[in-house]
Image (tube, helix red, strand yellow):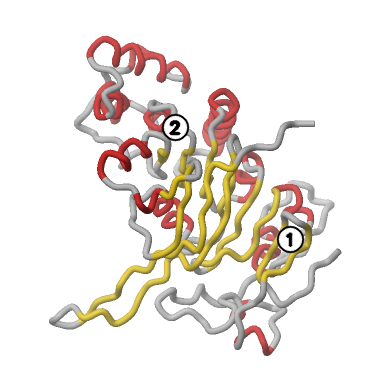
Amino acid sequence: MSQEKKELLKVEGLKKYFPVVSGFFSKVTGYVKAVDNISFTVNEGETVGMVGESGCGKTTAGRTIIRLIEPTAGNIYFKNKDIMQLKGQELKDMRRNMQIIFQDPYSSLNPRKTILEIVGEALEVHNIAKGKEKEDIVANLMEKVGLSPKYINRYPHEFSGGQRQRVGIARAIALKPSLIICDEPVSALDVSIQAQVINLLIDLREEMNLSYIFVAHDLSVVKHISHRIIVMYLGKLVEMAETEELFAHPCHPYTQALLSAIPNPDPTNKSHRIVLTGDVPSPINPPSGCPFHPRCVRRKPICSKEEPPIQHRTDTHFYKCFLEPDK
């Protein structure tokens, strides 16, 4: 029996609203509700996948959690410490433990700096290593992510997309963090390279006891790396469950539609495809009641009037919908 993992991160009622301004006096006329009241936890050594269509708030949620973007409301506890209250040196020290891998390996690396400068910058900022010691650490990190140490004096344009993302991973693990936000780290890469990078992330997770929040829209990738999966729609968390449970028993109609869109390699298995109609509503003016009801084929009259309740299929599987769970 494996020992129960400790809770590393706890997010409560997280919101991020971006003001919409118009007119000569830049008057606030509304808000883009990018992240709207989400709550979840991440345990030590665990990967929590975060999926949904483009514009559902996945990336904003990830960046808000590590305060790259300041939250509008909510609480974020990291190792039982409220990071919303941290400022100055305390926040800087906390950020050693929380890093991010960006989506685009082309724009996330400074083209004017060498790999030694890019990866080693954090070591200098946090007074960990300089000079020859920094060079040795960066060389070791390059080896760990599958790149030759002799490349440390090269510039980003001399690398392929997959190699650049490995550099981004090396930069993220340089400070030996506990939590890494993976913001669609393989979406810009070829399929064959995607598998290599995902396997690298899994190996590093086991070796360094890392926790990931893995943001992606490719459900097959998320299934491969995640222990639990969060499904988001229009800034809201609509379903969360352990990976195998979610794929075996999706309860929310939106989750069912996402899973039905995964290509099936077996031509004899005739799966039923659920095609969503209409576009994703604007987060500036979301629908009343359940945000998914305008596109839901199973909607009821109550769906457009009231916020759906939280329903539990199991102790670890919950979803927000008026439909009863299939036992």
Task: Determine the image quadrant of residue 51.
Answer: bottom right
Taking the spot 50% from the left edge, 38% from the top edge, the residue there is: 190
Kind of element beneath mark 1:
loop
Residue 110 is left or right of residue 144, and the answer is left
Q: Please state if 77 lies on the left or on the right of 72 as rendered.
A: right
For discs 2 and 1, the disc positioned in front in the rendered view = 2
Relative height, residue 236 to residue 111 (above, below):
below
Which residue carries the number 1 mark?
Answer: 250
Front residue of this view, candidates 269 and 149? 149
Quadrant in which the C terminus appears: bottom right
Above or below, 10 against 297 in this view is above
Residue type highlighted by circle 1: Pro
The quadrant holding residue 166 is top left
Residue 96 lies left or right of residue 302; in this view the side is left
Across and down, in percent, residue 206 comes to 60, 27
Indicate the position of residue 42 as horizontal and vertical percent values. Answer: 57, 46
Residue for point 42% across, 66% down: 34
- Tell which circle, 2 or 1, labels the residue nearer the N-terminal end: 2
Residue at 40% across / 32% down in the picture? Answer: 172
Q: Is residue 25 left or right of residue 48?
A: left
Residue nearer the viewer, 68 or 266 = 68
The number of numbered badges drawn on the structure is 2
In this view, 141 is above or below 2: above
Distance of label 2 from label 1 (alpha carbons):
33 Å
Kind of residue at disc 2: Pro
Q: Can residue 155 be seen in the rendering of this structure?
A: no
Q: Residues within 10 Å of mark 1 (few under 14, many from 20)?
A: many
Under circle 2, the secondary element is loop
Q: Residue furthest right?
A: 327
Residue for badge 2 = 177
Residue 126 in view of the camera = yes
- Image quadrant containing the N terminus: top right
